[in-house]
Amino acid sequence: MELRIDKLSKRYPNGVQALQDVSLRIPQGMFGLLGPNGAGKSTLMRTLATLQEADSGNASLDGINVLKDKDQLRRVLGYLPQEFGVYPKVSAEVLLSHFAALKGIENSKERREVVEALLQQTNLWEHRKKPLGGFSGGMKQRFGIAQALLGNPRLIIVDEPTAGLDPEERVRFHNLLSAIGENIIVILSTHIVSDVSDLCGRMAVIHQGRVMVTGEPAALVAGLQGKVWKKVIHSSELAAHRERFRVILIRLFAGRTLIHVWSDTPPDPGFEAVTPDLEDLYFATIRGYSQIAGQVN
């Protein structure tokens, strides 16, 4: 099973080029689509979810033309959008049963069994009678996954699912996504690097509507070995270092400023070599410093 995306492009009426010749091969399992806000991730997800049209290009899922055979695609699609609204006074059990009916599960006994199984799977069974308005953010996201799993989909798209979740809920949600991503295609669209490093066997970085790099996270990060350097500086030195070096990452460390820079050779005395990680790859790529950005696999 594979989702093939070929040269998808989309320009909005205001002139924004949201997607430009996006091509990807997405196999079974968890696939991370990583990029900053405004990179084109949500446009691509909505297009694949049949919620908007592309200007040009093609996409297919095991013989289904995603852009033309929309009803057929929707029968095998689960979608959790970035903004997932619920009826606050309705219980999880009642609303999920309603969604199941809309999905075509007409037999009441089968529908009850499906609803129970999904609420159990998402650890919401004990809360099934509780109004959704009383759910925490993480519980609402897990309910969103439950509705996305209705009908045994072959493709699930989740858009920024962990934004705003506390650490415990993020771990619970990660475990849930990991479990469901073993036998189907799950596309995880996010700007949170750790979501991709924790979950995904393959990934792509998208920026300004273009796919910058795609491949296995570990292999991509390995390509940065010997090219990332760190130094702790005073905040007053930051501007000067930005002028002199290709700074890819800035964070506070023990009250001081830690920078990572991109360089093929030791940039200056005082810098130490860094074992690169996915965050280094991400920031080097979107800043245009990483030579790997042109090596789309």
Image (cartoon, rainbow, N blue to C red):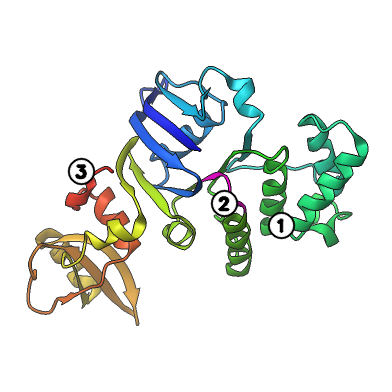
Determine which residue is flagged by label 1.
Answer: 139
Magenta segment: 180-187
Q: In this view, does 286 lie above or below 3?
A: below
Q: In this view, does 7 lie above or below 205?
A: above
Which residue is rendered at x = 21% and y = 48% of the image?
A: 288
Circle 1 packing at 10 Å, graded few (<14), some (14-19), many (20+), is: many
Looking at the image, the residue that sits furthest to the bottom is 254
Is there CB contact under 8 Å for labels 2 and 3? no
Q: In this view, does 145 lie above or below 165?
A: above
- Mark 1 vs mark 3, foreground winner is 3
Is there CB contact under 8 Å for labels 1 and 3? no
Q: In the drawing, does residue 49 fall left or right of residue 54?
A: right
Going by the numbered disc 3, the residue's amino acid type is Gly
Determine which residue is flagged by label 2.
Answer: 181
Q: In the drawing, does residue 161 fall left or right of residue 75?
A: left
* Distance of label 1 from label 3 (alpha carbons): 40 Å
Mark 1 or mark 3, earlier in chain? 1
Going by the numbered disc 1, the residue's amino acid type is Met
Q: In the drawing, does residue 160 fall left or right of residue 232?
A: right
Going by the numbered disc 2, the residue's amino acid type is Gly
- Mark 2 vs mark 3, foreground winner is 2
Determine which residue is flagged by label 3.
Answer: 294
Mark 2 or mark 3, earlier in chain? 2
Circle 3 packing at 10 Å, graded few (<14), some (14-19), many (20+), is: few
Q: Does the magenta stretch include residue 185?
A: yes
